[in-house]
Amino acid sequence: MKKVLVVLLLTILVSASQNVKAAFVDTYWGVRALGMGGAFTAVANDANGPLYNIAGIGFASHQEVTLMGSRLFVGADEVEIGANYLGYIYPIGLEYGSISFAWSSTSSPGVRREDTFSVGYARIMNDILVLDSNIIELSVGLNLKYLMQETKFDEENDDLRNYKGAMTGDIGVLANFANGIGIGYSSKYVVPADIGYMEKDEVKNVNVIGLSYYNDELPYIKIPCFTIAMDVIFRDNENMIRAGLESYVLDKRLAIRMGGREEAFNIGFGYAFVFANEAQLVIDYALELPMQVEESYGSHFVSLSFKF
Amino acid sequence: MNKIKLVSSLLIAIFMFITSLIYADSVSEFGAEVIFPSFWEATINHTPVNSVSSVNRILNVKSSVEFGGYIRATAQLLYYFDNEETFIDTIDKGSISHKATFYIATPKFQSSYETINYQIKATLKKKDDDKDYYVYWPSSDTFHTALITKSTTNFVVASIGGNVEFESGNQEYKNTKLVVPANALNNDTDITITHLEAENFDGRGMVTLYKINAESSGAEIVSGSSLAANFYYGTETNDTKFDLMYRETPASEWEKVTVTGFDAANKIISANVTKFGEYAVFISKNLSSNDYRPTKRIKIKSRIANGTYEGFRFKYLKEGDVVKIYNLNGKKIREITAGDGNGFVWDGRKDNGDWAESGTYVYQIKVKGKILSGTIAFVW
């Protein structure tokens, strides 16, 4: 346990020193995560893991591919912003860990586009850190990213190249305790990535601490397969909290989720089609209702995932 | 019988001799080179132009020529500026008809002159006579002087009222005029109408701008009273839909003024003036949603900072309107409620003064009870 805390503390200290200026606004995709308000750092155990905490893929037991599409701020006229995500995780084996490949994109046609390509790796470290698996399982991960932005400059700025890209990476730690508690830490954009067109514009480092609790059945109110989670995000002078919960019903096929943060309230659900060989086809939907943006019917996210 | 014929012939000859003497005396009234028997009289009718607007800078004279017996006539306008050394130019009107009103206008002249001096000349022709006959206004060897000016001042006694009229110099249309009713002012005062250069109000087509000022300190229009104003909006537009706007000083926001009359033939917009200040005529524009949105959707931080260009301009917004900027998390990062008279500008900064991060942003404009949204990109 002490080793766990040391690892966590060192990671936080290393990452906290990288307090640089901002470029990309850290936006959260992943439909299951969004249904839970984006509080996923201490969960992260599926193909959405590379977005929230790369260490989470260390707990993957099946291959999984997920594809997400979305439309933001539906109903706000002249606002056309879409986000897409494609993620794949492959668990090699307990002693080798898991790898991931992911691509996420946000675009406003005719204006600007952001793309992130990532390759990740994570491994449960119990054997190396000599941890009792009956008490805790600890995973550590690394995610290498390539950030690219494209801006559709007009005649006012037509002397500039449209594209700018840079490399960076994330590190993550996730500890799952036998009593259902999970503690996660993710430091994103650890390596300064300059994506400025005319001056230095380094992507802002983001540190997130997540807590979660899982129970097969929540006592007293008897909610099945219940997860509650909270993330605290530290980003320059802007800190925020996200919280959410999830429950699986109908023999773990139907998921119901809700969560939120200061600017939005989220709900979501998912349904898994289970096949004979434990393969699953999962459809997830999430709705994010903005609290501040007016005259919007919310942002809508849909994903299709295949676990095999 | 032969005696009767002889006497008749003598009488006719005597009559013709006496008549020729009479008409020979009238030559000197019209010019030494012309001989006008009374049957061949010609007169130019014209009301003098005493001043020309230094903003419009066009002299357009209204005139007519009466000519008896001549078969055709042409007219010309001769003019020069300041002194006789600053060239004389001639504008031909062409053929004119007996007693028919005609106009002759100069082109727009440069702004450095202080006076314009002009003369109207008509050239007349008789039947079967190639010779040119002339008639002049004011006379063949004099020019009338009109002052090129931007203002006119008239003293108005509060208890009596009065008129103030700014002569544009274009007699084809009416002048800008202010009618002050009795007891509409609280004090006797000089009232000045000044014609100012129209401003480029974000391309919104300001046609003309006047300042109406009471020169005496403390002189005001009595509450509940108004002055009847006619604003001449000039000849540089053929539009027929206009707005009249008012502002107290150049630093104030424009307010719309109710138009009480519109005379397209005389290029006059009428309104009741209740405050002294500046009045401008704008080409009326029914604003659509897109008129409020920024035309440039991508801006770079360093170019805003060094003044290469301004930030995102949301046009036509005024006090009471609001612009909000959100990041893609839906978090509001900036709220703008005031502008520079030509709309609101987002300079790329957050409410706390820090520069916003590179990214795509959503804006929402609250105007006239509607919410207009859109996306913009701010990058470094």
Image (cartoon, coloured by chain):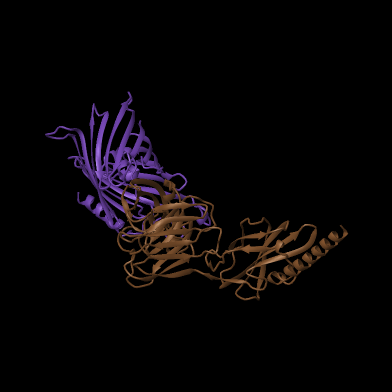
Chain colours: A purple, B brown
Residue most extreme to the right: B2
- Is residue A233 among the parts visible in the rendering? yes
Percent of width and height locating residue A248: 23, 31
Percent of width and height locating residue B153: 44, 70
- Is residue B345 among the parts visible in the rendering? no
Number of marks present in the image shown = 0
Q: Residue at x 67, y 61 (%)?
A: B75
- Please name whichever residue, B205 or B29, is drawn nearer the observer in this view of the structure: B29
- For the C terminus of chain B, the quadrant is bottom left
Q: Is B95 positioned to the left or the right of A271 in the image? A: right
Residue most extreme to the top: A276
Q: Is B147 positioned to the left or the right of B28 in the image? A: left
Percent of width and height locating residue B362: 37, 48
The quarter of the displayed image where residue A48 is located:
top left
Q: Is residue B243 above or below residue B217?
A: above
Q: Is A226 positioned to the left or the right of A191 in the image? A: left
Q: Residue at x 36, y 40 (%)?
A: A75
- Please name whichever residue, B40 or B17, is drawn nearer the observer in this view of the structure: B17
Q: Is B207 positioned to the left or the right of B138 in the image? A: left
Q: Is residue B221 above or below residue A127?
A: below
The quarter of the displayed image where residue B281 is located:
bottom left
The quarter of the displayed image where residue A305 is located:
top left
- Please name whichever residue, B340 or A152, is drawn nearer the observer in this view of the structure: B340
Percent of width and height locating residue A167: 42, 52
- Please name whichever residue, B99 or B236, is drawn nearer the observer in this view of the structure: B99
- For the N terminus of chain B, the quadrant is bottom right
